Amino acid sequence: RMLKKQTQCCLDIDRLNAAFLAIYESLIPPEEEKMKQELFLMSLEKLVNKEWPEARLYLYGSCANSFGVSKSDIDVCLVIEDAEINKSEVLLKLADILQSDNLQNVQALTRARVPIVKLMDPATGISCDICINNVLAVVNTKLLRDYAQIDVRLRQLAFIVKHWAKSRGVNATYQGTLSSYAYVLMCIHFLQQRRPAILPCLQEMRTTYSVTVDDIQCAYFDQVEKLRGFGSRNRETIARLVWAFFNYWAYGHDYANAVISVRTGSILSKHEKEWTRRIGNDRHLICIEDPFEISHDLGRVVDKFSIKVLREEFERAAEILQYDPNPCATLFEPY
Ligand code: GTP
Ligand code: MG
């Protein structure tokens, strides 16, 4: 009878597959949007090069890591190789230049954790944030994009998880919940852990790509076209993976001791990372190791109140997927 019950449950969950795929499809940005962004970036670069001829602009974040939904703001990084520059001065100068070029809502936020200039292009409606020399973000963007090439289920799962997190109000670091970047890392780690594995651990493989940024060596196997089909021995559907993802974070994860690590493709202990004590504002109530800045816990923003909110939301999602007659609607209900 147990077996029958389990089989029944799998069949039920797989019935949701078409609905999840439809949600995923509806969130994918159209090609045309990507083209507009690229053209806008080129025109920005031209403008910037008048002042700084050697400077380069790079897209990073969700518009470049393949986990961006339609109509997202774009994240741009201005790279100036000169070590002497003063970031605030450059940002203010940049804001001046942009303003005189008729871009709108230009604002320099020089005191933010990551200082940026914000702007909106009235011609395309594109809003963007420009930061300076944040090369690690450009490199982790490439890592995420490379993982997404290996198995389409990563992109599907991450879109659904991000959509859920935005709908439920648990995607705001300033409120103590997690960034989109953290959620994508949770998805990658989760798919590395499936048996058979759906994703490999690129940083444990032969190095084919290597850069050193701020004294951090970023190295991994980036010939991902050779890894297509890596996860094909695992036949789990997206519905099943969404169900298992929320079950893991609701009931399976050891919040007291475990650190998830995409870098090693495994679970580490808080003890070995020395993340057992609160230091300053870092509480380590949910631990997600950054793949390159390994002393960096992306869960550091979570406090004793927001951890409760997060865990209740994971449990809510798991319960809905298990028992709700119309889970696809309930799961994404605005909070
Ligand atoms: P949405 O804008 O919500 O669609 O997602 P996003 O992927 O743009 O995520 P987010 O705004 O959270 O972050 C933008 C990018 O900044 C990420 O893709 C990372 O490359 C980088 N980033 C964000 N947070 C951190 C962090 O704590 N550490 C590092 N190293 N990079 C980060
Ligand atoms: Mg973004």
Image (tube, rainbow, N blue to C red):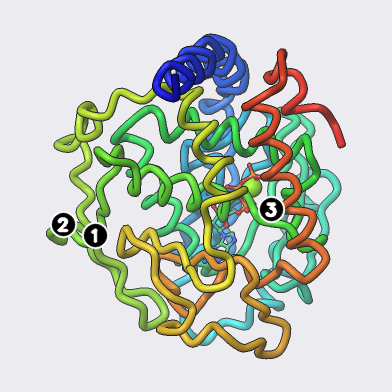
Query: Would residue 123 appear left or right of 275 to someone viewing this image?
Result: right
* Residue at mark 2 to residue at mark 3: CA–CA distance: 31 Å
Which residue is more in the foreground, 200 or 9?
A: 9
Q: Which residue is mark 2?
A: 208
Whether 321 is drawn above or below 48: the answer is above
Which residue is more in the foreground, 81 or 22?
A: 22
Q: Which residue is mark 1?
A: 220
What residue do we see at 43% from left, 16% from top?
Answer: 4
x and y percentages locating residue 160 in the rendered image: 59, 30
Asked if one can make out residue 95 in the rendered structure from this viewpoint, the answer is no
Quadrant assignment for the N terminus: top left
x and y percentages locating residue 137 in the rendered image: 49, 61
Kind of element beneath mark 3: strand
* Residue at mark 1 to residue at mark 2: CA–CA distance: 6 Å
Q: For ligand 2, tell me if the residue under mark 3 lies within 8 Å.
A: yes
Q: Which residue is mark 3?
A: 129
What residue do we see at 51% from left, 19% from top?
Answer: 9
The crowd level at tag 2 (other Cα within 10 Å; few <14, some 14-19, many 20+) is: few
x and y percentages locating residue 298 in the rendered image: 58, 66
